[in-house]
Image (cartoon, rainbow, N blue to C red):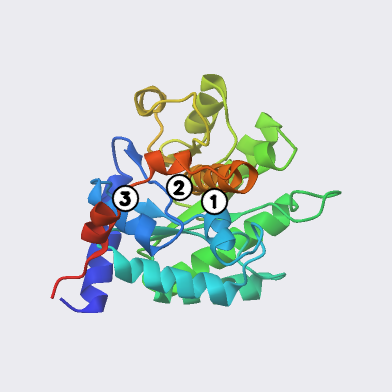
Amino acid sequence: MTTHDRTTLLRAQFKDLHRSGCFVIPNPWDLGSARYLASLGFKALATTSSGFAWTIAHADNQAGVDDVLAHLQKLTAAVDLPVNADFEDGFSTDTAGVEANVARACAAGIAGLSIEDSTPRADQPLRSLADSVARIRAARRAIDAAGGDVILVGRAENFIAGRPDLDDTVARLCAYADAGADCLYAPGLTTDDQVAAVVRAVAPKPVNVLVGQAGFTVERLAALGVRRISVGGALARSAWGAFMAAAREIADHGTFGCFAHAASGRDINALMARPD
Protein backbone atom coordinates (compact mmCIF):
# COMPACT_ATOMS: atom_id res chain seq x y z
CA MET A 1 0.00 0.00 0.00
CA THR A 2 1.36 3.44 -0.91
CA THR A 3 1.71 6.18 1.68
CA HIS A 4 -1.07 8.11 -0.04
CA ASP A 5 -3.44 5.13 0.01
CA ARG A 6 -2.63 4.45 3.68
CA THR A 7 -3.33 8.08 4.62
CA THR A 8 -6.59 8.09 2.65
CA LEU A 9 -7.73 4.91 4.39
CA LEU A 10 -6.90 6.20 7.87
CA ARG A 11 -8.71 9.46 7.21
CA ALA A 12 -11.80 7.58 6.05
CA GLN A 13 -11.68 5.45 9.20
CA PHE A 14 -11.41 8.59 11.32
CA LYS A 15 -14.44 10.17 9.65
CA ASP A 16 -16.42 6.97 10.28
CA LEU A 17 -15.60 7.18 14.00
CA HIS A 18 -17.26 10.61 14.14
CA ARG A 19 -20.54 9.47 12.62
CA SER A 20 -21.96 7.56 15.61
CA GLY A 21 -21.14 6.26 19.06
CA CYS A 22 -18.44 7.51 21.42
CA PHE A 23 -14.72 6.76 21.29
CA VAL A 24 -11.68 7.65 23.36
CA ILE A 25 -8.84 9.35 21.50
CA PRO A 26 -5.91 9.29 23.97
CA ASN A 27 -2.92 11.60 23.65
CA PRO A 28 0.59 10.13 23.37
CA TRP A 29 3.53 12.48 23.81
CA ASP A 30 6.15 10.54 21.85
CA LEU A 31 6.51 7.55 19.54
CA GLY A 32 6.85 5.00 22.33
CA SER A 33 3.72 6.11 24.13
CA ALA A 34 1.89 6.10 20.80
CA ARG A 35 3.02 2.54 20.14
CA TYR A 36 1.74 1.43 23.55
CA LEU A 37 -1.65 3.10 23.15
CA ALA A 38 -2.04 1.48 19.74
CA SER A 39 -1.34 -1.90 21.30
CA LEU A 40 -4.31 -1.42 23.67
CA GLY A 41 -6.80 -1.27 20.82
CA PHE A 42 -7.63 2.43 20.70
CA LYS A 43 -9.05 3.39 17.32
CA ALA A 44 -7.34 6.78 16.97
CA LEU A 45 -4.78 8.98 18.71
CA ALA A 46 -4.35 12.71 19.23
CA THR A 47 -1.19 14.67 19.88
CA THR A 48 -0.78 16.87 22.94
CA SER A 49 0.92 20.25 22.66
CA SER A 50 2.01 20.19 26.29
CA GLY A 51 3.17 16.58 26.36
CA PHE A 52 5.26 17.02 23.21
CA ALA A 53 6.67 20.38 24.31
CA TRP A 54 7.96 18.84 27.53
CA THR A 55 9.90 16.21 25.56
CA ILE A 56 11.99 19.00 24.02
CA ALA A 57 12.29 20.98 27.28
CA HIS A 58 9.76 23.65 26.30
CA ALA A 59 6.66 24.86 28.10
CA ASP A 60 3.26 24.27 26.52
CA ASN A 61 2.64 26.52 23.49
CA GLN A 62 6.38 27.22 23.12
CA ALA A 63 7.30 24.54 20.60
CA GLY A 64 7.86 25.92 17.11
CA VAL A 65 5.83 24.90 14.09
CA ASP A 66 8.77 23.08 12.47
CA ASP A 67 9.29 20.95 15.59
CA VAL A 68 5.57 20.19 15.75
CA LEU A 69 5.38 19.25 12.06
CA ALA A 70 8.39 16.94 12.41
CA HIS A 71 6.68 15.31 15.39
CA LEU A 72 3.48 14.83 13.36
CA GLN A 73 5.36 13.21 10.50
CA LYS A 74 7.11 10.76 12.81
CA LEU A 75 3.97 9.94 14.80
CA THR A 76 1.72 9.32 11.80
CA ALA A 77 4.37 6.99 10.36
CA ALA A 78 4.84 5.12 13.65
CA VAL A 79 1.29 3.80 14.12
CA ASP A 80 -1.40 2.49 11.80
CA LEU A 81 -4.06 4.66 13.40
CA PRO A 82 -5.60 8.02 12.50
CA VAL A 83 -3.84 10.88 14.28
CA ASN A 84 -5.50 14.15 15.25
CA ALA A 85 -3.06 17.06 15.57
CA ASP A 86 -3.19 19.54 18.44
CA PHE A 87 -2.22 22.44 16.18
CA GLU A 88 -2.60 25.17 18.81
CA ASP A 89 -3.53 28.50 17.14
CA GLY A 90 -2.09 27.59 13.75
CA PHE A 91 1.36 28.96 14.67
CA SER A 92 0.89 32.30 12.96
CA THR A 93 -0.09 35.86 13.75
CA ASP A 94 -2.22 36.08 10.60
CA THR A 95 -4.67 33.91 8.69
CA ALA A 96 -2.41 33.51 5.66
CA GLY A 97 0.16 31.87 7.92
CA VAL A 98 -2.49 29.65 9.51
CA GLU A 99 -3.59 28.48 6.07
CA ALA A 100 -0.02 27.73 5.00
CA ASN A 101 0.81 25.87 8.22
CA VAL A 102 -2.38 23.79 8.10
CA ALA A 103 -1.50 22.79 4.55
CA ARG A 104 1.89 21.59 5.83
CA ALA A 105 0.20 19.63 8.61
CA CYS A 106 -2.12 17.93 6.13
CA ALA A 107 0.94 16.90 4.12
CA ALA A 108 2.33 15.23 7.27
CA GLY A 109 -0.41 12.59 7.06
CA ILE A 110 -2.72 13.63 9.87
CA ALA A 111 -6.41 12.65 9.90
CA GLY A 112 -7.63 15.58 12.02
CA LEU A 113 -6.46 18.97 13.24
CA SER A 114 -7.64 21.43 15.90
CA ILE A 115 -7.36 25.21 15.94
CA GLU A 116 -7.82 27.02 19.25
CA ASP A 117 -8.77 30.59 20.08
CA SER A 118 -6.58 31.36 23.09
CA THR A 119 -3.63 33.75 23.25
CA PRO A 120 -0.57 33.96 25.54
CA ARG A 121 -1.70 37.39 26.76
CA ALA A 122 -2.94 37.54 30.35
CA ASP A 123 -4.92 40.71 29.61
CA GLN A 124 -6.62 39.17 26.57
CA PRO A 125 -6.57 35.38 26.89
CA LEU A 126 -9.05 34.83 24.04
CA ARG A 127 -8.90 36.13 20.49
CA SER A 128 -11.80 38.15 19.21
CA LEU A 129 -14.58 36.12 17.69
CA ALA A 130 -13.92 37.65 14.26
CA ASP A 131 -10.23 36.72 14.36
CA SER A 132 -11.01 33.23 15.64
CA VAL A 133 -13.60 32.59 12.93
CA ALA A 134 -11.15 33.84 10.28
CA ARG A 135 -8.60 31.30 11.52
CA ILE A 136 -11.09 28.45 11.26
CA ARG A 137 -11.97 29.57 7.73
CA ALA A 138 -8.28 29.68 6.82
CA ALA A 139 -7.80 26.15 8.14
CA ARG A 140 -10.88 25.04 6.21
CA ARG A 141 -9.48 26.46 2.97
CA ALA A 142 -6.20 24.62 3.46
CA ILE A 143 -7.94 21.34 4.23
CA ASP A 144 -10.27 21.65 1.25
CA ALA A 145 -7.34 22.45 -1.04
CA ALA A 146 -5.64 19.27 0.21
CA GLY A 147 -8.68 17.12 -0.57
CA GLY A 148 -11.07 17.93 2.25
CA ASP A 149 -10.71 14.62 4.09
CA VAL A 150 -9.02 15.93 7.27
CA ILE A 151 -11.37 16.54 10.21
CA LEU A 152 -11.23 20.18 11.35
CA VAL A 153 -11.82 20.73 15.07
CA GLY A 154 -12.78 24.18 16.38
CA ARG A 155 -11.74 24.83 19.98
CA ALA A 156 -13.22 27.40 22.35
CA GLU A 157 -10.71 27.80 25.19
CA ASN A 158 -12.87 29.85 27.59
CA PHE A 159 -12.83 27.38 30.47
CA ILE A 160 -9.06 26.89 30.49
CA ALA A 161 -8.22 30.52 29.67
CA GLY A 162 -9.83 32.05 32.74
CA ARG A 163 -13.06 33.03 30.97
CA PRO A 164 -15.52 30.29 32.02
CA ASP A 165 -18.54 31.80 30.29
CA LEU A 166 -20.74 29.01 28.93
CA ASP A 167 -22.85 31.31 26.77
CA ASP A 168 -19.77 32.75 25.08
CA THR A 169 -18.29 29.28 24.71
CA VAL A 170 -21.42 28.03 22.95
CA ALA A 171 -21.58 31.12 20.73
CA ARG A 172 -17.98 30.62 19.70
CA LEU A 173 -18.44 26.93 18.96
CA CYS A 174 -21.53 27.62 16.86
CA ALA A 175 -19.60 30.26 14.91
CA TYR A 176 -16.73 27.82 14.33
CA ALA A 177 -19.19 25.19 13.11
CA ASP A 178 -20.66 27.71 10.67
CA ALA A 179 -17.13 28.60 9.52
CA GLY A 180 -16.39 25.00 8.58
CA ALA A 181 -15.33 23.11 11.69
CA ASP A 182 -16.38 19.45 11.52
CA CYS A 183 -16.05 18.78 15.26
CA LEU A 184 -16.33 21.14 18.24
CA TYR A 185 -14.32 21.15 21.43
CA ALA A 186 -14.40 23.23 24.63
CA PRO A 187 -11.70 21.95 26.99
CA GLY A 188 -12.33 22.47 30.68
CA LEU A 189 -16.02 21.57 30.93
CA THR A 190 -16.66 19.86 34.26
CA THR A 191 -20.40 19.28 34.64
CA ASP A 192 -23.05 17.28 32.85
CA ASP A 193 -25.07 20.45 32.21
CA GLN A 194 -22.14 22.19 30.53
CA VAL A 195 -21.42 19.22 28.29
CA ALA A 196 -25.08 18.73 27.41
CA ALA A 197 -25.43 22.42 26.52
CA VAL A 198 -22.50 22.23 24.09
CA VAL A 199 -23.69 18.98 22.51
CA ARG A 200 -27.18 20.41 22.06
CA ALA A 201 -25.96 23.71 20.61
CA VAL A 202 -23.79 22.29 17.82
CA ALA A 203 -25.81 19.17 16.97
CA PRO A 204 -25.60 17.24 14.73
CA LYS A 205 -21.89 17.99 14.58
CA PRO A 206 -19.78 15.85 16.94
CA VAL A 207 -18.31 17.14 20.20
CA ASN A 208 -14.96 16.31 21.81
CA VAL A 209 -14.70 16.50 25.61
CA LEU A 210 -11.41 16.71 27.51
CA VAL A 211 -11.00 14.56 30.61
CA GLY A 212 -7.91 15.55 32.56
CA GLN A 213 -8.82 14.29 36.01
CA ALA A 214 -11.14 11.82 37.73
CA GLY A 215 -14.84 12.56 37.41
CA PHE A 216 -16.37 11.78 34.05
CA THR A 217 -16.56 8.25 32.66
CA VAL A 218 -16.86 7.09 29.08
CA GLU A 219 -20.34 5.72 29.80
CA ARG A 220 -21.51 9.00 31.32
CA LEU A 221 -20.18 11.17 28.50
CA ALA A 222 -21.59 8.83 25.86
CA ALA A 223 -25.01 9.16 27.47
CA LEU A 224 -24.70 12.95 27.16
CA GLY A 225 -24.15 12.61 23.42
CA VAL A 226 -20.40 13.17 23.34
CA ARG A 227 -18.78 11.62 20.28
CA ARG A 228 -15.13 11.57 21.31
CA ILE A 229 -13.08 11.91 24.51
CA SER A 230 -9.47 13.06 24.72
CA VAL A 231 -7.15 13.42 27.71
CA GLY A 232 -4.79 16.18 26.57
CA GLY A 233 -1.56 16.19 28.55
CA ALA A 234 -2.94 14.03 31.37
CA LEU A 235 -1.12 10.84 30.35
CA ALA A 236 2.13 12.77 29.96
CA ARG A 237 1.54 14.41 33.36
CA SER A 238 0.93 10.99 34.87
CA ALA A 239 4.24 9.74 33.49
CA TRP A 240 6.01 12.88 34.69
CA GLY A 241 4.42 12.47 38.12
CA ALA A 242 5.81 8.95 38.54
CA PHE A 243 9.23 9.99 37.24
CA MET A 244 9.43 13.07 39.48
CA ALA A 245 8.36 11.15 42.57
CA ALA A 246 10.98 8.46 41.90
CA ALA A 247 13.74 10.99 41.26
CA ARG A 248 12.83 12.90 44.44
CA GLU A 249 13.01 9.71 46.51
CA ILE A 250 16.52 9.07 45.25
CA ALA A 251 17.63 12.70 45.68
CA ASP A 252 16.02 13.26 49.09
CA HIS A 253 16.33 9.85 50.76
CA GLY A 254 18.92 7.84 48.87
CA THR A 255 16.46 4.96 48.53
CA PHE A 256 15.09 3.19 45.49
CA GLY A 257 11.73 1.79 46.57
CA CYS A 258 10.12 3.69 43.71
CA PHE A 259 11.43 1.11 41.26
CA ALA A 260 9.06 -1.50 42.68
CA HIS A 261 6.37 -0.06 40.43
CA ALA A 262 8.52 0.28 37.30
CA ALA A 263 7.43 -1.41 34.12
CA SER A 264 9.38 -4.44 32.94
CA GLY A 265 12.17 -3.60 30.53
CA ARG A 266 11.56 -6.92 28.80
CA ASP A 267 7.89 -6.05 28.23
CA ILE A 268 8.75 -2.60 26.90
CA ASN A 269 11.40 -4.03 24.58
CA ALA A 270 8.90 -6.57 23.27
CA LEU A 271 6.44 -3.79 22.51
CA MET A 272 9.01 -1.60 20.76
CA ALA A 273 10.93 -4.33 18.88
CA ARG A 274 10.91 -3.96 15.13
CA PRO A 275 10.29 -7.10 13.07
CA ASP A 276 13.41 -8.47 11.32
Q: Nearer the viewer, residue 232 or 88?
A: 232
- Closer to the observer: label 3 or label 1? 3
Neighbours of disc 1 within 10 Å: few (<14), some (14-19), many (20+): many
Q: Are marks 2 and 1 in contact (CB under 8 Å)?
A: yes
Q: Taking 276 as reference, is 190 left or right?
A: right
* SS of the residue under disc 2: strand
**Among the 4 quarters of the image, the one containing residue 49:** bottom right
Q: Nearer the viewer, residue 62 or 247?
A: 247
* Residue under the image location 55 percent in, 74 percent down: 67
Question: What amino acid does circle 1 point to?
Answer: Gly
* Residue under the image location 71 percent in, 55 percent down: 130
* SS of the residue under disc 1: strand
Question: What amino acid does circle 3 point to?
Answer: Leu
Residue sitting farthest toward the front: 254
**Among the 4 quarters of the image, the one containing residue 97:** bottom right
Task: Tell me where residue 241 appears, x and y as whole percent.
Answer: 54, 43
Question: Which numbered disc flags the more N-terminal residue, 2 or 1?
Answer: 1
Tell me if residue 223 comes above or below residue 27 in the rendering: above
Distance CA(mark 2)–CA(mark 1): 6 Å
Distance CA(mark 2)–CA(mark 3): 23 Å
Q: Taking 171 as reference, is 21 left or right?
A: left
* Residue under the image location 35 percent in, 64 percent down: 149
Residue topped by disc 2: 183
Task: Tell me where residue 190 appears, x and y as whole percent.
Answer: 57, 27
Task: Tell me where residue 260 appears, x and y as whole percent.
Answer: 39, 39
Q: Taking 128 as reference, is 210 left or right?
A: left
* Residue 154, label in figure: 1
Distance CA(mark 3)–CA(mark 1): 25 Å
Question: What amino acid does circle 2 point to?
Answer: Cys
Neighbours of disc 2 within 10 Å: few (<14), some (14-19), many (20+): many
Q: Split into 4 quadrants, where in the image is the C terminus?
A: bottom left
* Residue 37, label in figure: 3
